[in-house]
Structures are given as C-alpha cells and as structure tokens.
C-alpha cells in the first residue's frame, strides 16, 4: 500500500513539473481594458494519443465497438466531452480573470468583444494507470476587429492531475488546468 501511495505522489509531482506555459510574444496588458473576451476553439489539427488526427482516433474507437447502439453512445459521449472541454476552459478563465479584472469569457459570436482567445487544441492524451490526461494548446489572443495578435501562448502537458485509467476523457480537467496556468502567468506579468 505504501508503494502505491508513493508511486501516486511521485506521478502527480512529475506530471505537474512537466506542465509548461510559454509566452511566445506580446503581453497581458490588454486585460486592463477588457470586459468581455470571446473564445474560439479549433480542433482541426488535434492529434489524440498515438493517432495523427481526431478522425483516425474515432475510426479506431468505433471499430472496437460491437453494436450500432454502442457506437452512437460513444460518439455522443465524445461530442459531450469536447463540449465539456470548451466549457471548463471558459468557466475557469472567467473565474480566474473575473475576480481580479471583471472579465467575462464567452463563446465566439459576441459582438462587443474587444479581444478573442483563439484556442488551437494540438494534442490530447488519455491517462493511464500512472499518467494523467493532458492537453497541448496554442493560444493566440487577438484583437477581434483586426485579428492582430496581442499575445501568443504555448501550453504543453496541461495535466488533469488525476492519474488512473479513465473510461472517458478527463479533458475538461486538463483544460481547466491550462486556464489556471494562463491566469497564473498573467498575474506574474501584468503591470498596473
């Protein structure tokens, strides 16, 4: 029992050590005058586990299922998980930035957003017994009208912090972690 506890603790710390956020360009000064920020998601080049794209992953998963009913249920669950990923990211951003700066994050489509988070999901990995679910992201924060970049971020290995094989993705936890990483970096870099 002690060995399992020790392995779990070590895994938790190692996974969190490998989580990285890098400010590629720009700064967070835009937060000082933003009230609403749109969030737009792009899954077009996402890889999943060992698969080169999401479609290959879906074909593999569907091929493992025996009945049409199970296939439809799995597809529905996958769509729900992607929606949960978006919601968790947006809600955590609103919680983190709403407290300090009074900023509301919404899905793309708001007319009065001065800035937009363009979130490109690069990779998603399902956790295993000793590893966490994690995501890799590229986030370009742009002015809504001109699409001029004000801040570019790369996030690697945003971990769900919950090792153990899951029956469905925990991407929403990983995305919430990524949002917290952004807020933490912004607090360090912002200058009033």
Image (cartoon, rainbow, N blue to C red):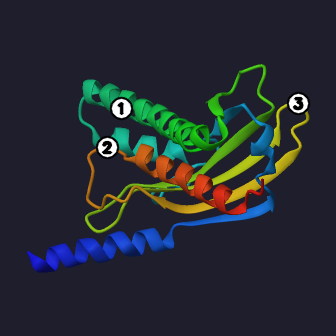
Asked if marks 3 and 2 touch (Cβ < 8 Å), the reply is no
Q: Would you name the residue on which mark 1 appears?
A: 77
Q: What residue sits 91% from the left and 35% below the top?
A: 146
Q: Secondary structure at mark 2?
A: loop
- How crowded pointer 3 is (Cα within 10 Å; few <14, some 14-19, many 20+) is rated as few
Q: Secondary structure at mark 1?
A: helix
**Given this view, does label 3 or label 2 mark the residue nearer the observer?**
3
x and y percentages locating residue 137 in the rendered image: 61, 54
Asked if marks 2 and 1 touch (Cβ < 8 Å), the reply is yes
Instruction: Compare residues 160 and 191 and report the one nearer the observer.
Output: 191
x and y percentages locating residue 40 in the rendered image: 67, 34
Q: With 95 as the anchor, is 45 left or right in this view?
A: right
Q: With 165 as the anchor, is 60 left or right in this view?
A: right
x and y percentages locating residue 9 in the rendered image: 27, 73
Q: Would you name the residue on which mark 2 appears?
A: 168
Q: CA distance from mark 3 to mark 2?
A: 38 Å
x and y percentages locating residue 129 in the rendered image: 25, 64
Q: What residue sits 75% from the left and 44% below the top?
A: 31
């Amino acid at each position: 029992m002690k060995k399992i506890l020790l392995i779990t603790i070590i895994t938790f710390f190692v996974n969190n050590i490998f989580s990285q956020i890098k400010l590629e360009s720009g700064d967070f000064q835009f937060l000082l005058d933003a009230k609403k920020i749109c969030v737009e998601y792009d899954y077009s080049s996402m890889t999943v586990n060992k698969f080169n794209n999401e479609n290959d992953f879906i074909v593999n998963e569907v091929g493992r299922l025996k009945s049409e009913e199970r296939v439809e249920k799995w597809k529905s669950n996958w769509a729900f998980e992607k929606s949960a990923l978006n919601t968790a990211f947006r809600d955590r951003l609103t919680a983190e930035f709403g407290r300090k700066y009074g900023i509301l994050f919404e899905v793309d489509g708001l007319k009065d957003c001065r800035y937009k988070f363009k979130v490109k999901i690069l990779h998603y990995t399902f956790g295993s017994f000793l590893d966490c679910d994690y995501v890799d992201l590229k986030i370009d924060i742009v002015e809504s009208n001109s699409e001029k970049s004000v801040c570019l971020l790369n996030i690697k290995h945003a971990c769900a912090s919950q090792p153990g094989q899951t029956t469905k993705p925990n991407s929403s936890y990983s995305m919430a972690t990524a949002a917290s990483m952004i807020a933490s970096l912004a607090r360090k870099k912002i200058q009033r």
